[in-house]
């Protein structure tokens, strides 16, 4: 891909790929996938930090050394410190709600311990995270929360129940006072695919065109490095069941992955030239390539978005940012 001396403006309608690399993740590369151009620089507030999740211009960052948490506004460079949370791991789920306006900090930051099914949540200004267990009676095995997303101002999450016939169930978490209230959504459970070729999966929930989608990424082969395909389901809220879909029309889905765990999903209507419709853009752990899966014909293509980043120590993620110049983000350009 081609580097730019005068970075273009980030449009609102599709995400940019951000690549953090260097000795202490000190370098940031912004890639515009619509025209195959990138710009590289440093954002000091992101030094030695990993991106947990993002909403619009706000990022949730965790310091790789101290494990301190903060919010960073990429537009204003404002940093909001969050309470310390020692019990979370890099592979746990993070959800960030959108503020009601640019000047307000009325959003919720939520971490989900996927193996213990424990929710941690706070708002800027809180002294500590509150915590609450998700408890659901299941006699036959272990419960794991494998994906979560914000949809219609509520947090929806997938619970996976192990056993002789593993299943998925969809739940909703919403705030009632200072506590979370959990509601089971699905009337019929969704069986987990159990073919011998599949030895690793990533699950994602994403809002797409006003619908809630469940993306099931299946991998196999040596060290599960071969993509076997995607299954896509739409939640039919009227009948409370998942309905499998074979295409997503003019929409495009963007998936990120970190430490072999599905990190985040974003969707957009692919109106711009250069953005492939009815496709899934995805990244792999410890891999600097960008992959595109065609939902219609199941073909996979790949590209190297930036040849100058580290081969083995790059973190790739997707960010949606209001229309601003990338040069305003990457001051102290290298």
Image (cartoon, grey):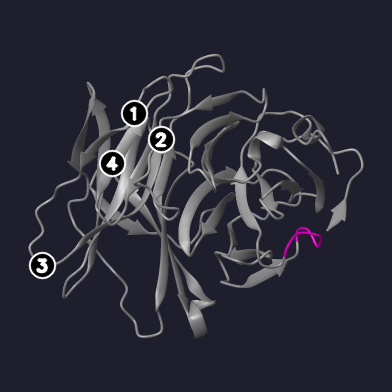
Q: Earlier in the sequence, mark 2 or mark 4?
A: 2
Q: Earlier in the sequence, mark 3 or mark 1?
A: 1
Q: Nearer the viewer, residue 93 or 83?
A: 83
Element at badge 4?
Answer: strand
Q: Which residue is mark 4?
A: 119
Q: Distance from label 3 to label 1 (Cα)?
A: 35 Å
Q: Position of residue 45 (x, y in %)?
A: 65, 34
**Predominant secondary structure, magenta span:** loop
Question: Do we see residue 13 in this rendering?
Answer: no
Q: Earlier in the sequence, mark 2 or mark 3?
A: 2
Q: Secondary structure at mark 2?
A: loop
Is the residue under label 3 in contact with that under label 2 (CB below 8 Å)?
A: no
- N-term mark: 1 or 2: 2
Q: Which mark is residue 33?
A: none
Judging by the rendered image, the residue that carries numbered circle 1 is 128
**Residue 18 in picture, x, y percent from top left:** 67, 48
Marks 2/3: CA distance? 35 Å
Contact (Cβ within 8 Å) of mark 3 with mark 1: no
Instruction: Indicate whether 78 appears above or below 280.
Output: above
Q: Secondary structure at mark 1?
A: loop
User: Which residue bears the numbered disc 3?
Assistant: 140
């Amino acid at each position: 891909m081609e580097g730019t001396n005068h970075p273009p403006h980030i449009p609102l309608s599709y995400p940019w790929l951000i690549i953090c690399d260097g000795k202490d993740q000190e370098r940031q590369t912004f890639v515009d996938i619509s025209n195959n151009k990138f710009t590289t620089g440093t954002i000091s507030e992101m030094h030695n930090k990993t991106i947990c999740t993002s909403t619009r211009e706000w990022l949730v960052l965790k310091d790789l050394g101290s494990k301190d948490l903060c919010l960073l506004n990429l537009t204003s460079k404002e940093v909001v410190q969050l309470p310390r949370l020692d019990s979370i791991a890099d592979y746990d789920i993070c959800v960030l709600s959108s503020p009601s306006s640019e000047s307000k900090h009325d959003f919720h930051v939520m971490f989900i311990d996927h193996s213990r099914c424990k929710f941690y949540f706070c708002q800027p200004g809180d002294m500590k995270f509150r915590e609450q267990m998700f408890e659901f009676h299941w006699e036959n095995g272990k419960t794991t929360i494998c994906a979560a997303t914000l949809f219609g101002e509520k947090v929806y999450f997938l619970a996976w129940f192990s056993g002789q016939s593993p299943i998925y169930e969809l739940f909703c978490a919403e705030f009632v006072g200072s506590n979370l209230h959990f509601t089971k959504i699905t009337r019929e459970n969704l069986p987990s695919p159990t073919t011998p070729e599949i030895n690793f999966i990533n699950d994602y929930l994403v809002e797409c065109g006003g619908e809630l989608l469940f993306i099931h990424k299946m991998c196999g082969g040596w060290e599960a490095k071969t993509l076997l395909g995607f299954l896509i389901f739409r939640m039919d809220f009227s009948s409370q069941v998942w309905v499998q879909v074979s295409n997503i029309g003019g929409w495009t889905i963007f998936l990120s992955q970190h430490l072999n765990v599905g990190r985040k999903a974003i969707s957009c209507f692919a109106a711009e030239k250069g953005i492939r419709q009815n496709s899934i853009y995805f990244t792999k752990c410890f891999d600097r390539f960008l992959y595109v899966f065609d939902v219609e014909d199941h073909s996979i293509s790949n590209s190297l978005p930036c040849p100058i980043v580290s081969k083995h120590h790059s973190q790739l993620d997707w960010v949606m940012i209001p229309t601003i110049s990338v040069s305003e983000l990457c001051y102290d350009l290298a």
